Image (cartoon, coloured by chain):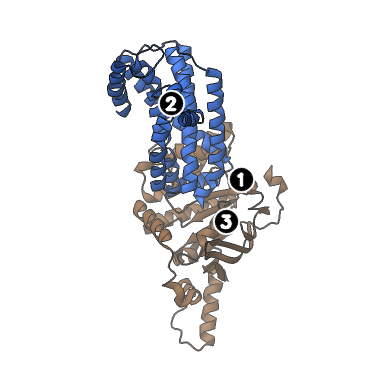
């Protein structure tokens, strides 16, 4: 619902205003990959709640007493979050197509889009599970999630190009994995200039770091 | 591979001087405990006695800040992976996944325990049959009764053929018939495999009936240890020596009162402990 509103209202309106330099494409086109990344992130960022729920139900304790490495449990969760986000991404993609966004239908590019969405969501779910391992309670995790989603969204290139941001926000955007996800999605879906290889590398490293951090803190939840 | 490195005579569990504190509270305060291979050992005690904390140290969920914990000779603090391979664990909460069938629940644990792919289907079927769930195996766990869920969790713990089965309050919240059912299956599996069973419970009658040896734990330490008969007779002898009139023999519950003394009421577990117990009871009920 939320992503549909972003595209329908925000996207359509700003397309008419032409206030944001998009490199010659309609603003709603420019916005669509950003909303795909954002809606996928919103799902992933609350994924840690599930692990707290599993802790409360005793499932986590049982899994942690098995010889399966923590990193394998976290990686499994991260990619489950990725697959869940993928469903959301498909829905947003269809809405965008209905709104007349000129998207690619090249299957290889779409496959790459799926890989980027899964990787991005894997990172954000690991971020969520890492926070879960620190705050240890559902309420505090919800609070954290809500506190960081909007800054992550606005501090990225999802709504506007990095070039129009003030210097400090450009720095935030550079450190924000969401920006790399959006850059890759935009390049793949719309054919705009991109840095696909480095985007992919950044997301891969971020996801790996996320798995490491979340695995290291997972044991705290069982104490 | 772990089995080759085991010392043949090592006790199933050997704790010495185990201490574990949460902040100021010493939940386990110098625990010495030995569980022999092949026995059913009951760890009894009031809420907040430190049973669950001790179990969590044993199962490698908690670190071992002071003292040593060995499981079949493997150090639970240093060699965690070796310990985990030997354990089957059923926590207090009802932890089966209601959205999966009984068979899927057990198959998941066959996978996380690295049961070879070729053997998996057969081992899962065996574990389900051992707890009498073969017929209900392909129904969703959400449709199971409390006793069936417990038996399903038993199957999850058994599918890896553990050497030591750890059960935390396995019959909490179950009706008497379901309780008997759970214990009958524990007994049958023990007889068939010779595995060691370590169980915590509040129910003295169960401990009396099903445990080879019991330890009464209070305020983080073992206060009495022996076979149920030894403990009952010991108290009876002490009472006779004190000149008390004896119309009936003491029960294990009397031993428990004698050991825990008057401190029972004000030490009855912390809030979180009680809340989790009640939640389990409600979900089973």
What color is chain B drawn in? brown
- Identified at 39% across, 33% down, the residue is A42
Q: Chain of mark 2?
A: A
Q: Which residue is mark 1?
A: B85
Q: Are marks 1 and 2 on the same chain?
A: no
Point out the frontmost of discs 3 and 1. Answer: 3
Q: Is residue A20 left or right of residue A63?
A: left
Residue B116 sits in quarter: top right
What color is chain A drawn in? blue
* Residue at the far bottom in the pictured view: B243
Asked if the residue at tag 2 contacts the one at tag 1, i.e. Cβ–Cβ closer than 8 Å, the answer is: no
Marks 3 and 1, how far apart at CA: 15 Å
Q: Nearer the viewer, residue A138 or B281?
A: A138
Label 3 residue SS:
helix
- Identified at 39% across, 54% down, the residue is B280
Q: Which residue is mark 3?
A: B57
The location of residue B218, given as percent across then percent down, is 51, 69
In the displayed structure, would residue A160 be above or below residue B143? Answer: above
N-term mark: 3 or 1: 3
The answer to whether any part of residue A176 appears in the image is yes
The location of residue B132, given as percent across then percent down, is 44, 45
Q: Is residue B173 left or right of residue B114?
A: left
Residue B181 sits in quarter: bottom left
**Quadrant location, the C terminus of chain B:** bottom left
Q: Chain of mark 1?
A: B
Label 1 residue SS:
helix
The location of residue A13, given as percent across then percent down, is 28, 20
Point out the frontmost of discs 1 and 2. Answer: 2
Q: Which residue is mark 2?
A: A165
Q: Chain of mark 3?
A: B
């Amino acid at each position: 619902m939320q992503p549909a509103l972003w595209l329908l209202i925000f996207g359509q309106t700003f397309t008419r205003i032409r206030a944001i330099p998009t490199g010659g494409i309609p603003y709603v086109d420019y916005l669509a990959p950003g909303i795909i990344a954002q809606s996928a992130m919103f799902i992933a960022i609350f994924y840690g709640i599930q692990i707290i729920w599993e802790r409360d139900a005793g499932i986590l304790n049982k899994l942690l007493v098995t010889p399966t490495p923590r990193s394998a449990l976290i990686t499994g969760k991260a990619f489950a979050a990725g697959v869940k986000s993928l469903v959301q991404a498909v829905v947003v993609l269809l809405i965008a197509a209905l709104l007349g966004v000129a998207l690619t239908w090249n299957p290889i590019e779409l496959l790459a889009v799926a890989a980027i969405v899964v990787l991005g969501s894997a990172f954000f779910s690991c971020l969520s599970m890492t926070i879960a391992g620190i705050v240890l309670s559902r309420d505090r995790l919800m609070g954290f999630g809500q506190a960081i989603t909007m800054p992550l969204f606005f501090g990225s290139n999802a709504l506007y190009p990095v070039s129009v941001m003030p210097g400090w926000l450009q720095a935030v955007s550079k450190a924000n994995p969401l920006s790399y996800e959006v850059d890759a999605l935009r390049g793949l879906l719309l054919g705009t200039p991109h840095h696909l290889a480095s985007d992919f590398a950044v997301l891969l490293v971020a996801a790996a770091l996320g798995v490491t951090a979340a695995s290291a803190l997972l044991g705290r939840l069982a104490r | 591979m772990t089995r080759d490195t085991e010392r043949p005579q090592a006790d199933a569990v050997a704790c010495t001087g185990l201490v574990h504190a949460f902040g100021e509270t010493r939940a386990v305060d110098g625990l010495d405990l030995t569980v022999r291979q092949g026995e059913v050992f009951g760890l009894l005690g009031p809420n907040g006695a430190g049973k669950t904390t001790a179990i969590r140290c044993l199962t490698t969920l908690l670190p071992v800040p002071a003292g040593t914990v060995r499981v079949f000779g493997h150090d639970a603090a240093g060699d965690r992976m070796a310990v985990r391979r030997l354990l089957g664990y059923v926590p207090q909460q009802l932890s089966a996944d209601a959205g999966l069938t009984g068979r899927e629940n057990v198959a998941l644990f066959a996978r996380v325990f690295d049961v070879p792919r070729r053997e998996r289907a057969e081992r899962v079927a065996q574990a389900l049959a051992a707890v009498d769930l073969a017929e209900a195996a392909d129904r969703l766990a959400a449709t199971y009764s409390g006793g069936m869920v417990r038996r399903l969790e038993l199957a999850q713990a058994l599918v890896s053929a553990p050497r030591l089965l750890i059960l935390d309050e396995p019959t909490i919240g179950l009706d008497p018939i379901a309780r008997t059912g759970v214990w009958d299956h524990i007994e049958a599996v023990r007889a068939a495999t010779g595995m060691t069973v370590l169980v915590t419970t509040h129910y003295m009658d169960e401990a009396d009936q099903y445990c080879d040896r019991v330890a009464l734990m209070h305020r983080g330490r073992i206060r009495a240890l022996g076979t149920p008969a030894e403990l009952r007779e010991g108290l009876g002898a002490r009472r006779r020596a004190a000149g008390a009139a004896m119309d009936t023999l003491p029960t294990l519950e009397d031993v428990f009162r004698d050991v825990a003394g008057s401190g029972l009421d004000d030490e009855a577990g912390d809030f979180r402990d009680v809340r989790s117990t009640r939640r389990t009871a409600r979900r089973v009920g």
